[in-house]
Amino acid sequence: MVTDQLRDDYDVVVVGGGAAGLSGALMLARARRSVVAIDAGAPRNAPAAGVHGLLAREGTPPGELLERGRTEVRGYGGQVVTGEVVAAVREADGFTVALSDGRSVRARRLLVTTGLVDELPDVGGLRERWGRDVIHCPYCHGWEVRDQPIGVLATGPMSVHQALLFRQWSTDVTFFSHTMPSPTGAEAEQLAARGIRVVDGEVAALEVVEDRLVGLRLSDGTVVLRAAVAVQSRMVARGAVLASLGLQPAQHPSGAGEYIPADPTGRVEVPGVWLAGNVTDLVAQVGAAAAAGAGAAAQINADLIAEETGQAVAAFRARQDPFSAESETRVSELVMGDRRHGL
């Protein structure tokens, strides 16, 4: 039975219900952990028609892929609950996780998979067509726009590289410098050598006819015909929950945006917290995000096992050692009782 009813506490709360979060929740549920994935319902790839580059699930609509994942998690006893986590507070034995609707839940460990937000330049029509014929990743969308006239809208230091990548899928690529300086030196030479035309001048809006992109309109009114536009968004990790734990975003070394640093296993400096997916790896595709979620979940389970084993060893020693702290306490109580009775 599907329910949004939260228990009081879990071994692990997964914040986020995308590929990374659901994969982590699945791994933990199969490890017989009590786990809930709390999902705000705003996946980054929602506008896309299909997920690409994912073995055995090529072209699957994003919503369908997530629904399959939810079903699999629930099939092993895990929960997937709709809600927005707004804060998490570290306590002696775990965390208290607060939701925007006033609910709260306790967790021994946290796996944060909140993903990222794509910040796009202020060009008319760009946001509305994002994920359709306005794209960012050639590995995600290049096949779908192969051999078509492609425009690359410059937004940052990686834009020339993006144009060179898309040249692999089409011989007709035009680079729009937009508000960036026109390429010079080695970059200009590379574009020219690959037959990539450079158009200077700010792009004002997309030209759309009958819900189909036909070109880019410059601020002087010139329209350059294009069937698709590649634009590198500024990718910003959704880190509000982590900020409540004292974890702050850092500028990505590539200049592509902001991420929350973590070690290769997803562990961060706050004990008991792991990250997976785009919140810490801005360029991870669905398959990589899912793999990271599973890997972090295995690390979390191992950490819980280490804690539980330590507790079991302490209890075992107490039972075996007549002079353990517990035994000494009992002896002390008996002696004090005898004294009170004058013995």
Image (cartoon, helix red, strand yellow):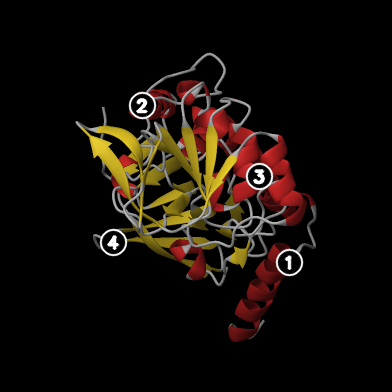
Q: Is residue 255 left or right of residue 133?
A: right
Q: Earlier in the sequence, mark 2 or mark 4?
A: 2
Q: Residues within 10 Å of mark 2 (few under 14, many from 20)?
A: some
Identify which residue, 116 or 103, lies in the foreground: 116
Identify the element where label 4 is drawn.
loop
Identify the element where label 3 is drawn.
helix
* Foreground tag (2 vs 3): 3
Task: Tell me the distance, in whole angstroms, between the alpha carbons under discs 2 and 4.
Answer: 30 Å
Q: Is there any visible trace of residue 31 in the rendered image?
A: no
Residue 73: image quadrant is: top left
Q: Which mark is residue 234?
A: none
Q: Badge 2 is on which residue?
A: 49
Q: Badge 3 is on which residue?
A: 161
Q: Badge 1 is on which residue?
A: 325
Whether label 2 touches label 1, CB < 8 Å: no
Q: Which residue is located at x 26 percent, y 44 percent?
A: 5
Q: Which residue is located at x 63 percent, y 35 percent?
A: 165
* Foreground tag (1 vs 3): 3
Q: Quadrant of the N terminus?
A: top left
Image coordinates for residue 342, horizontal then vertical, percent: 63, 86
Looking at the rendered structure, the kind of residue marked 1 is Ala
Task: Tell me the distance, in whole angstroms, between the alpha carbons under discs 1 and 3.
Answer: 66 Å
Looking at the rendered structure, the kind of residue marked 2 is Ala
Image coordinates for residue 172, horizontal then vertical, percent: 54, 29
Q: Earlier in the sequence, mark 2 or mark 1?
A: 2
**Is residue 54 shown above or below 225?**
above
**Is residue 228 shown above or below 253?**
above
